[in-house]
Every structure is written in C-alpha cells, then in structure tokens.
Image (cartoon, helix red, strand yellow):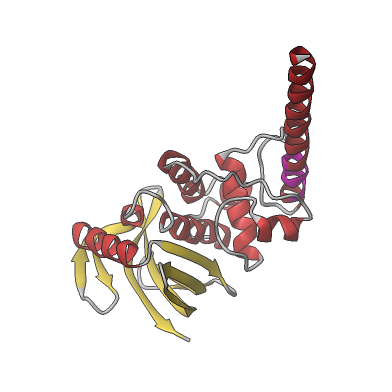
Amino acid sequence: MRSVFLAVAIGFAVAGLVSADENVRAVQEKLRDGGFYLGQIDGAYSSQLSAALTRYQIRNGLPITGQLDEDTSKALGAKPAVTKNAATPEESSETWRHLRRGERQTIAKTHSRTSAERVRDYVGAFVLAGLDPKVGSETEFFADRVHYYDQGVLDREQIRKDLQHYAERWPQRRFWVDGEITIKPQDGNRVQVTFPLRYELRNGDKHSSGKINKTLVLEPAGDDLEIVAVNERKD
C-alpha cells in the first residue's frame, strides 16, 4: 500500500514539474516573439529569463521583479511561477548583472553603449539592484564621485551608507517604470536618462507611495556605463 501511495505522489510531483516546465516554455516563446528573450526554449527558469521578464515589465509598466509574478503572468496569459522563498543574493545579483551587460542582439548590431535598448536594460538592472537582498548593490553602478541628489558630490562609500539607511527605513519596496524612458545626449560622451518611477514602500504599519521622475547622467566606462549624477523630483 505504501508503494502505491509513493508512486501516486511521485506521479503528481512529476506532472507538476512537467506543467511548470511547459508554462515557463510558453512564457519563453512569448518573450522571444516580442524580442525580449534570446535564450533557449527549454522550460528552465534562468537569470536570462529573469532579465527578459524585467525588460517586459519595463515596457509594459509592470512592477519590476524579474520574476513571473502574478501581474506579469496575467499580462503574458501564463501561470505565476514565483516560489515562496525569496531569491538568494546570488540569484538576484546574477539577474541584474545579466541585464547590465546588455546581452541583446540589438546591442550587438548597433555596438552602442548608449542605444535605447542598452539604456533600458541598464535602468532595469539599476532598479533590480535596489531590490537585491544584498543592500547597497546599486553602489556598483556609480562612478567614484557622483553628484548625488541635493547632497552634493559623494563618493561610493558615502552613497552605500545612504542606500543602507534607505533600506533600513523601507525594508519592503516595489518599483515600476510608469512611462517612457527618455535619453538626451550631453557634453562629451555623457547621456541624460529620465524615467518616471512609481514606488510603494513599507515598514510595518508605515507606508509611502507615489511617483517620481528620476534622472541619471551616464558616462561610458570601458565597455560599461556608470552613473556620474543622479536626481529626482516628485510629480
């Protein structure tokens, strides 16, 4: 009798895995058809798929999570595929690092570090880094010295401390790009990137939500980009 129950349990488990794989496979196909995903259609939930989901979320004004959450799965006509366990710091970092590298055919074709697609990926990576369990991950996006909001010029360590303070104040955070990302060339090789960012912040009973227009000034640094100035204003 025990062997029968065990066989049934294994059967249900395998069926669940097959169903999940098919669900993810269907999502991969939809994202590929939309130009968001360039990987294999294999039903595997990878950092490459998470990066593609982030691109889709940015383009469709969805909360940026890099996951097939309820909002994103509904938009894609799929089933949610988010585990109850939070992503590990390694998994979170792998996703935004993948995005930051801008591994897309459009980038390879243009060879431009500041193309629209490259900048969208960079913005997505920057926002995801702000949700990384490793607090202060966004520091990696900044130059050695940065014009930092209304605080003047700060170095990376000062910025890291500010980000840690922000995370302590608001441990639960949700962000999504609520409109178009605009790119304006500046002096030299710099570009100014502005995007509307909607947010929801929580800390126990405390709650804050709203919308800001965030502006980043980016400068090429080798094959990458780095932030040399950041500011924001509320709508």
Nearest the eye: 36 or 53: 53
Residue at x 49%, y 44% (from the top left corner): 87
Q: Position of residue 30 (x, y in %)?
A: 76, 49
What type of secondary structure mainly makes up the magenta span?
helix
Residue 26 located within the stretch drawn in magenta: yes
Compared across the picture, whether 23 is left or right of 46 comes to right
Q: Where is residue 227 in the image (x, y as percent from the top left)?
A: 34, 62
Examine the image and state in which quarter residue 65 appears: bottom right
Examine the image and state in which quarter residue 43 appears: top right
Residue at x 74%, y 46% (from the top left corner): 27
Residue 160 located within the stretch drawn in magenta: no
Say how many tags the image has: 0
Highlighted range, magenta: 24-30
Residue at x 48%, y 46% (from the top left corner): 101
Q: Where is residue 193 in the image (x, y as percent from the top left)?
A: 46, 71
Q: Quadrant of the N terminus?
A: top right
Compared across the picture, whether 62 is left or right of 158 comes to right
Q: Position of residue 132 (x, y in %)?
A: 42, 51
Q: Can residue 183 be seen in this view?
A: no
